[in-house]
Each structure stands twice: as structure tokens, then as C-alpha cells.
Image (tube, rainbow, N blue to C red):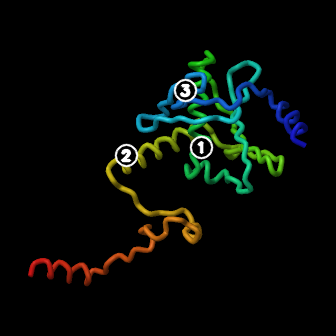
């Protein structure tokens, strides 16, 4: 089934080119691609499972293999809640442009490939302008990083049900009670006495 899927995937004009492409490897085991500045706030290191390149070398497609059973929704990717693909697209553009001398490579819709189900799924909605979406996601991410640098760490889980099994629930502020106005006022009076 996997081989049939690979043959079908090449009908779109992309062919496997790079596998397990590391960048920013702190142990210097890779081909020495340094950490990549994705934005002013994001310096990234990682490993991209696979990069397919078009026959004319003008575009590329990332394939990310998933071994687990959980699936990543297009909504999560497009909203910026799942950053792996947008960050890896920017990293792949850098790698292809500067390490492999490809001129301004354009990203095609990246794919998650489930090794359990032997099925692939596009990361973005087919109607999305991928470059525009990625730029918006990275700007939002930059803003969040700046807030973190200022010490702003709000507790805002996407799904409170995930708190049920969280290993850090004993120290998390998600269920911290906010004092009422009368409690705050009473504490203020007590402090002046």
C-alpha cells in the first residue's frame, strides 16, 4: 500500500529529493546547515523527514511521517496552533535556496503521512494561499514570543479536557480562583492598617 501511495504521489510532479534533512544540529552530525532564523524572534533547529522537489526545481513539498494515531487538523495548522509545518516550510526554503542553490523555491501544500493507516493528508486547505497563511502564522508567533520574553505566560489551553491527564496540573494556574472585588478591596484595606 505504501509503494502504491508513493507512485500516486509522484503524479503531481514532485519527486523525493532530501530525507531526514537536519539543520542547526548542535552535535554537528548533519551537513552543517546552521540554525535558521525564521523571523527576528525564531531561531530554529530540527529535522525534516522528507522534501520532494518539482522537476523544474521551482517548488517543493514537505512530507512529514506520523507514527502515532492522532491526526493534525488543517484548522489547527492554518490557525497557528500547530507550528511544525509552517516553520519547516520556511526552513526548507532556506535550505533549498542557500544550500542547494534553488532560486526562490515555492512551497506546495505539505503532507502528513500516517505510517499506521498508509494515508496522506494535506496540512493546509486546498484553497489556501500557503505563503500568505505562513506569513500570518509567523507574525502571530513572533508576537507571542515577544510576550513571553516580557514574562507574559497566560494559561489558555486549547482544550480543557487535556488538563485531565496533564502531569503539571498540581502547579498549573488554570483552576486558580481570581479574587472577587470585595476580597481584593478587603486585602487592600488590611494592608493599610
Q: Is residue 48 above or below residue 72?
A: above
Picture coordinates of residue 61, whole percent (x, y): 70, 32
- Secondary structure beneath label 3: loop
Q: Position of residue 119 (x, y in %)?
A: 82, 47
Residue 96 lies in quadrant: top right
Please tell me which residue is depicted at 71% across the width and 33% down the height of the picture.
Answer: 50
Q: Secondary structure at mark 2?
A: helix
> What is the CA distance from the residue labelled 2 to the residue labelled 3?
29 Å
> Considering only vertical position in the picture, is 156 above or below 133?
below
Q: What residue is shown with label 3?
A: 28
The mark that comes first in sequence, 2 or 3, is: 3
Q: In front: mark 2 or mark 3?
A: 3
**Residue toward you, 113 or 126:** 113
Read off the residue under disc 1.
Answer: 84
The residue shown at (90%, 38%) is 4
CB of mark 2 within 8 Å of CB of mark 3?
A: no
- Disc 3 versus disc 1: nearer the observer: 3
Q: Is 84 placed left or right of 67 in the picture? A: left
Task: First in sequence, mark 3 or 1: give its number.
Answer: 3
Residue carrying label 2: 146
Instruction: Residue 94: name its quadrant.
Output: top right
Q: Do the CB atoms of the residues marked 3 and 1 lie less than 8 Å apart?
A: no
Query: Which quadrant is home to the N terminus?
Result: top right
Question: Along the polypeptide, which appears first: circle 2 or circle 1?
Answer: 1
Secondary structure under badge 1? helix
Instruction: Kindly identify the residue that appears in the image at 60 percent across and 26 percent down.
Output: 30
Q: Is residue 48 above or below residue 66?
A: above
Q: Which mark is residue 151?
A: none
Amino acid at each position: 500500500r505504501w509503494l502504491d501511495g508513493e507512485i500516486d504521489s509522484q503524479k503531481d510532479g514532485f519527486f523525493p529529493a532530501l530525507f531526514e534533512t537536519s539543520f542547526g544540529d548542535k552535535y554537528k552530525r548533519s551537513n552543517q546547515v546552521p540554525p535558521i532564523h525564521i523571523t527576528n524572534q525564531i531561531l530554529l533547529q530540527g529535522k525534516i523527514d522528507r522534501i520532494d522537489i518539482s522537476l523544474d526545481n521551482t517548488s517543493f513539498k514537505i512530507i512529514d511521517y506520523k507514527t502515532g494515531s492522532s491526526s493534525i487538523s488543517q484548522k489547527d495548522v492554518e490557525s497557528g496552533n500547530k507550528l511544525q509545518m509552517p516553520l519547516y516550510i520556511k526552513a526548507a526554503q532556506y535550505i533549498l535556496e542557500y544550500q542547494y542553490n534553488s532560486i526562490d523555491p515555492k512551497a506546495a501544500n505539505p503532507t502528513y503521512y500516517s505510517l499506521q493507516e498508509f494515508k496522506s493528508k494535506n496540512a493546509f486547505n486546498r484553497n489556501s494561499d500557503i505563503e500568505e497563511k505562513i506569513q500570518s502564522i509567523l507574525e502571530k508567533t513572533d508576537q507571542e514570543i515577544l510576550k513571553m520574553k516580557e514574562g507574559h505566560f497566560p494559561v489558555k489551553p486549547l482544550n480543557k479536557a487535556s488538563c485531565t491527564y496533564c502531569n503539571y496540573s498540581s502547579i498549573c494556574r488554570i483552576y486558580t480562583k481570581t479574587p472577587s472585588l470585595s476580597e481584593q478591596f478587603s486585602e487592600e484595606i488590611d494592608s493599610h492598617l
